[in-house]
Image (cartoon, grey):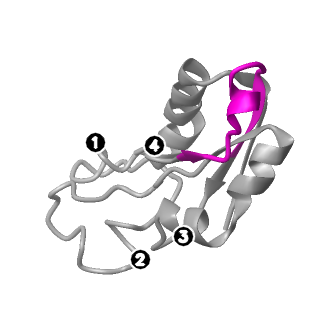
Amino acid sequence: MCRKVCGVSPKHFLRYELSVIVISVGLTCTEQNFVTKAGAQRAAAEHGLIVVAPDTSPRGCGIEGEDDSYDFGSGAGFYVDSTEDKWKSNYRMYSYVTKELPEIINSNFPVLTDQCSIFGH
């Protein structure tokens, strides 16, 4: 799910550990809403920040009913781990945002692990 990392200036990326900002775009959006509309890449590069804009919504899991409503299933960004058998193997967004995503970021990029922030709408 972590498809986009943007806003890292090569001069910063190669020399320093950087602070991380993760933007979560919420219900019915993809990471592209932020990446194409916010213009944050330039500011992040100027200030030496890593901006991560993951798609935090499960998509294309092949579960019956996942595309029946815009606010539930595919594209619905609720940050909880599902407990229902039908959903629980794919819809684990709390674990993704609080555990899996930070591990991916920390193991693949030169980050200051104590300087990571998550924000969104």
Q: Nearer the viewer, mark 3 or mark 1?
A: 3
Q: Residue at x 51, y 28 (%)?
A: 104
Q: Nearer the viewer, mark 1 or mark 4?
A: 4
- Marks 2 and 1, the one that precedes in the sequence: 2
Left or right, 72 with respect to 53, comes to left
The span from disc 2 to disc 3 (Cα, nearest Å) is: 17 Å
Residue 92, position as x, y percentages in the image: 41, 45
Task: Identify the residue under disc 2.
Answer: 71
4 and 2 marks in contact (CB < 8 Å): no
Comparing labels 2 and 3, the label whose residue is closer to the camera: 3
Residue under label 4: 2
Say if the magenta span includes residue 7.
Answer: yes
Residue at screen point 38% across, 67% down: 75
Q: CA distance from mark 4 to mark 3?
A: 15 Å
N-terminal of the pair, mark 4 or mark 2, is 4
What residue range appears in magenta? 5-21
Q: Amino acid at mark 1?
A: Ser
Disc 1 from disc 4: Cα separation: 18 Å
**Cα separation between marks 4 and 2:** 21 Å
Residue found at the far bottom of this picture: 69
120 or 71, which lies in front? 120
Few, some or many C-alpha atoms within 10 Å of disc 3 (few <14, some 14-19, many ≥20)? Answer: few
Q: Are marks 3 and 1 in contact (CB under 8 Å)?
A: no
Mark number displayed over residue 7:
none
Toward the right, the furthest residue is 47
Question: In front: mark 4 or mark 2?
Answer: 4
Dot 4 and dot 3 residues touching (CB under 8 Å)? no
User: Within the image, what quadrant is residue 38 found in?
Assistant: bottom right
Q: Which residue is mark 1?
A: 89
Looking at the rendered structure, the secondary structure element under dot 2 is: loop
Q: Which residue is mark 3?
A: 33
Residue pictured at 54% horizontal, 22% vertical: 108
